[in-house]
Image: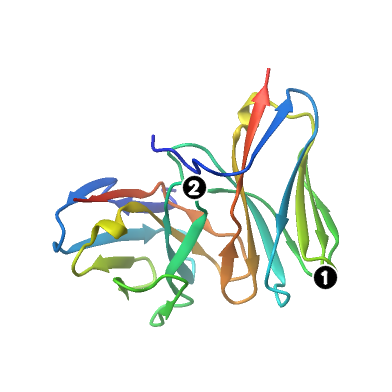
Amino acid sequence: NAGVTQTPKFQVLKTGQSMTLQCAQDMNHNSMYWYRQDPGMGLRLIYYSASEGTTDKGEVPNGYNVSRLNKREFSLRLESAAPSQTSVYFCASSPSFDQPQHFGDGTRLSIL
Amino acid sequence: GESVGLHLPTLSVQEGDNSIINCAYSNSASDYFIWYKQESGKGPQFIIDIRSNMDKRQGQRVTVLLNKTVKHLSLQIAATQPGDSAVYFCLFGNEKLTFGTGTRLTIIP
């Protein structure tokens, strides 16, 4: 099994451009999550989806939108990228909130 | 790969010794706790978890201890090996989970 797959792995954007980060999981998990990780910090939750058809804000949702397209896929969109959004973005999934999350390898996003 | 946790607290341990990594959590309503290991350039990997109705749980070479009175979680790694070098994060909460700051574990050969 591939687990959690994130695309793209690397991306460079100009300020103001839009971008969608894709995430798919093949473990039939109900819950999916988007985090960002900046140097010197832990992971911060942007948005999560407890189950198909629901999404909720996390700790740092401003500047982002998400779509739970189906049970497998959870995308993160930057409508107008800003340099402050330069970060490594991780997607994760879990059977439910109180079970371990499985992470993808991340998308490294730079905004100039 | 990119640098993970440039300014994180660092713990240096002699190879073969035991390591103890600590996490203080803020949410007293937390009822689920997880330890993750993150190597450079990779996503976090699950190590072990514990629920609030337990004080201790053991895995292969790892033990997690939970002290709810002082809101403290620790990860003990026995006989530390070079492959244990990584950044370690705790994750805690109930419906919404929060990552702790993290600790960089460095193994001295």
Which residue lies at the image location 62% right of the left edge and 28% below the top edge? B83
In this rendering, position of residue B40 left or right of residue A78: right
Q: Chain of mark 2?
A: A
Above or below, B82 against A32 in this view is above
Above or below, B98 against B35 in this view is below
- Where disc 1 sits, the SS reads loop
- Where disc 2 sits, the SS reads loop
The quarter of the picture where residue B32 lies is: bottom right
The quarter of the picture where residue B51 lies is: bottom right
Q: Which residue is identified by label 1?
A: B53
Q: Which residue is identified by label 2?
A: A40
Q: Point out residue A84 in the picture as x, y percentages from the top left corner.
A: 30, 59
Residue contact at pointers 2 and 1, CB within 8 angstroms: no
Q: What's the amino acid at mark 1?
A: Asn
Residue B38 or A13: which is nearer the viewer?
Answer: A13
Q: What's the amino acid at mark 2?
A: Gly
Q: Chain of mark 1?
A: B
Disc ID at residue A106: none
User: Which marked residue is nearer to the observer: mark 2 or mark 1?
Assistant: 2
Q: Point out residue A30 in the picture as x, y percentages from the top left corner.
A: 49, 72
